[in-house]
Image (tube, rainbow, N blue to C red):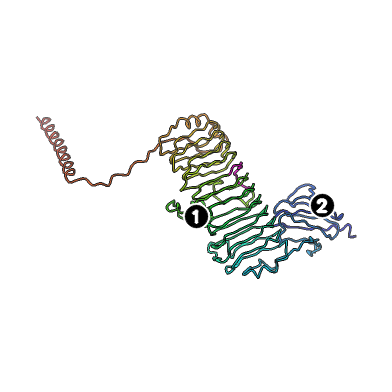
Amino acid sequence: MSTESRGFTFKYIIWDGVTYYETTDRHVVQIRRKESLGQEDLRGKEIPLHSRLTIYSTQPLNIPLKTKINLSAHFYMHDMTSRTPIISFVKSSAPECNVINGPQNIYSPDDLTQFSNCTTINGAFVIGHNYTGAINLSHVTNFNGFIQTEDSTSQTAPSIPGLTSIQMDNLATMGRGLFFANTPALTTVSFRNLAVIDTINFAGVPAALQMSFPALKNVTGDLYISPPLGRIDFPLLATANTITVLSSDSTSENLETDLGLSSEWSYDGQHNVPALNINFPSLQNTTELQIVGNISSLSMPSLTLVGPDEDPYHAPLTGQSTMKIETWGNPINISFPVLQSVKDSYFTGDIQSLNMPALQSISSSMTVTAFIPLDIDFPTLQNATDIEMSGNISSAVWPSLKTIGTLSILSDLPLDCAPSSTAYNSSIHDASGLYTEYYFSCRFVPLLPLPSKKHLSPGAIAGIVISCVAFVAIIVCGALLYTKRRKA
């Protein structure tokens, strides 16, 4: 059998990122995803995340690869019969450095000197607990891996008191992400050119931390920030899988189990947490949005969709609402001017107004608990499954409602239920035929004052006793007189 007719098969596994294939080699006859049907040819095309590929060739190859986002070290190409490597890669001319045998431990700035001439780094860095000073890798343009503080995934991660800043201002792409925990002296995080990243996770960092991601457009995984930062601003971020922002260590019971936070939810003392100013001016869609804390302002003028991700690798935590806003301390106006669809939503706290003029669909449920008087008006809402509202609901109108399963309003304030009743009665309640229960409830339940703790005076007590005795005596006498007359 000649070499030309042998037909080598190469298998390529991508763990993270999107790889761009360029080849003019005449021996490559096809590149195909394992899951695909038919004669799909992916030569020169973007390959979807986590794809399992088969490359068909007539003989061993030299394939030039151009990495757009990330090329993991966990890959192989081989002859499927002999399982021996039969392929080589043409490297780029830029200096490229590989971290071999696991993550590179960084205990001091000296440990970074070996990477001083690298523009591309393939691997991972772990910042040790005794690191002191700044990390400056501004010469690096591509980092195909992750950077994390020591044991950052553990709830008992050691403190790294000496780390002051991390700066990678020329970095354009990062494969996995940033994982930082318990860094009390960290004041600066600067990634001025970074456009795409998988995960950003900061927990236990100081309020004075200045985060700079002015070019970031896409977080393919999770954006998680859990310190009392005064301002969170991602000016160009358009898409993110999940966004979680907590301004303190306390959170609601839905978050506590999965995020490993406090199991007791209380608003007491939370006013001491610095006010949180959140600005995502370009955010268009996310699968999950969770913001909890002393929110002073919240701006997401471009958000159109909040909904679940079908990819189990990045799916929201089990039991989570896809949108959760909990706030206290500062009465705020919550506005999503172009939001059209949301799966689950949960709003509670000092909400002065809740404005969603373009909202058309709530595919699962909405819960609103108002601590201060709140008018409810969703002028374009047409379809919802369940809506529950309680607390200081001062009014509620639904002018466009067409389908609704359950609508329940329990207000502490005088409330006109007629608009809600009219909207519910004119709507379809079981369009899909799947619901076993659906109902309407609207009540005004005023808060009753607590019983007085003042004690009655002795004279008042005596008067009450005498009155009771006299009343009983009259009844007894009347009964005896009635009995005697019957006998007579």
- Total count of labels: 2
Q: Tell me the quarter of the image containing the C terminus.
A: top left
Name the one closer to the observer, 290 or 116: 116
Neighbor class of circle 1 (other Cα within 10 Å; few <14, some 14-19, many 20+) is many
Name the one closer to the observer, 243 or 429: 243
Residue topped by disc 2: 30
Q: Give yes or no for contact between labels 2 and 1 (Cβ–Cβ under 8 Å).
A: no
Residue 434 image label: none
**Residue 332 screen position, x and y as percent:** 49, 44
Residue visible at 62% across and 61% down in the picture: 166
In space, the residues marked 2 and 1 are separated at their CA atoms by 53 Å
282 relative to 401 in the view: left or right: right
Q: Which residues are magenta?
A: 300-309
Name the one closer to the observer, 362 or 414: 414
**Residue 212 screen position, x and y as percent:** 62, 54
281 relative to 389 in the view: left or right: right
- Can residue 80 be seen in this snapshot? no
